[in-house]
Image (cartoon, rainbow, N blue to C red):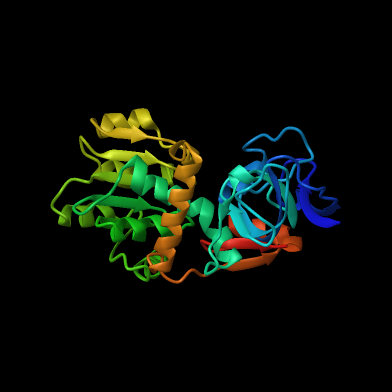
Amino acid sequence: MSDVVRLHQQGGPEVLRLESENVPEPGPGEVRLRQEAVGLNYVDTYFRDGTFPLRPLPAVIGVEAAGTVEAVGPGVTEFSPGQRAGYFFSPGAYRSVRLIAASQLVPVPDDVPSDVAASLLAKGLTAWARVRRVFPVHSGTLAVVTGATGGVGSLLAPWAQHLGAKVVALVARPEQVAAVTALGVEDVAVANTGDLFRLVSQAVQPVDVVYDQVGQAVFDDVAGVLTSGSTLDLLGNASGEIDVSRLRTQASGVRITRSSTGEHLPSRAALLGAAEELFDALREGVFGKREITRYALADVVRAHRDVESRSAGPAPVLIP
């Protein structure tokens, strides 16, 4: 028997229940993975609370994890028992052992702990998709990153800067500035203070791209720095959707994009290449010191409460 967290109805954190299950031998193309860490993402709360309907119930949420392969099914040649592996988006992660298609897995290097990998894959590949595919940054790019202390933003801002961009980061509160400057990003604005417009103006060039994952709460800040030819990448809406029609009125000629990470990983080769680049950036110290917040799988209710209150930090994981 192994542990699994199920929800039998959608609602608050209290609907998450620790239960037991038997995990069978893997079938054709499958791997049985003993998970050593499960990534926590804000999107998990949407699956739990009903923002994203789940059918059928009961259901197991969570989309990323890392661990060690226990067994492989017929036809699996890329992985073998004892090998470490992880995944970035395969629903059903909140459990200690699971079956998963081998095609969903990426090898986890020996020098990357499982808790780091589980905290990094979904958020890091999302950041990779932005700086490499949505708007590839380079020397001379002026990029604005909102929500720069969040799970994705804390990776995206320093990575864009590492690739040559001048980055202006936007945070919600003054006390968050230090967390971003610790990543090496010097230009940090506090939302709704005029800081963003001032810092962008000092750059003496138009904004090339705004990577926005906050939405409505930073509308005025974002609209105030976009010009004709800028790209606005809507990769999240933590405070509600931006009114795109209103934005087009205030900032005409802006290219607006919205896409999922998976759209930029159309093949296995693309996934493996992106994951390798992500792990290389980690090794090079691009993301600074990763502070992992660990919760026992049995403490998943508290973990979800902390994620919703923004007190779990940018890299929370569940430990089965």
Residue 9: x, y in percent?
77, 40
Quadrant (top left/top right/bottom left/bottom right) for the N terminus: bottom right
Considering depth in this image, is 86 or 296 the residue closer to the camera?
86
Left or right of 293 in this view: 161: left
Left or right of 62 in this view: 237: left
Residue 44: x, y in percent?
62, 48
Left or right of 168 in this view: 96: right
Q: Say above or below: 107 vs 289.
A: above
Residue at 63% x, 67% y is: 294
Residue 256: x, y in percent?
33, 34
Across the whole image, how many numbered discs are drawn on residues? 0
Left or right of 50 in this view: 219: left
Residue at 60% x, 43% y is: 103
Q: Is residue 211 visible?
A: no
Residue 226: x, y in percent?
25, 41
Q: Say above or below: 67 vs 130.
A: below
Considering depth in this image, is 56 or 132 the residue closer to the camera?
132
Q: Is residue 291 visible?
A: yes
Q: Kindly give the residue lying farthest to the left in the view shown.
A: 204
Quadrant (top left/top right/bottom left/bottom right) for the C terminus: bottom right
Q: Quadrant of residue 257?
A: top left
Considering depth in this image, is 310 or 81 the residue closer to the camera?
81
Residue at 31% x, 47% y is: 221
Considering depth in this image, is 111 or 40 the residue closer to the camera?
111
Q: Say above or below: 307 vs 224.
A: below
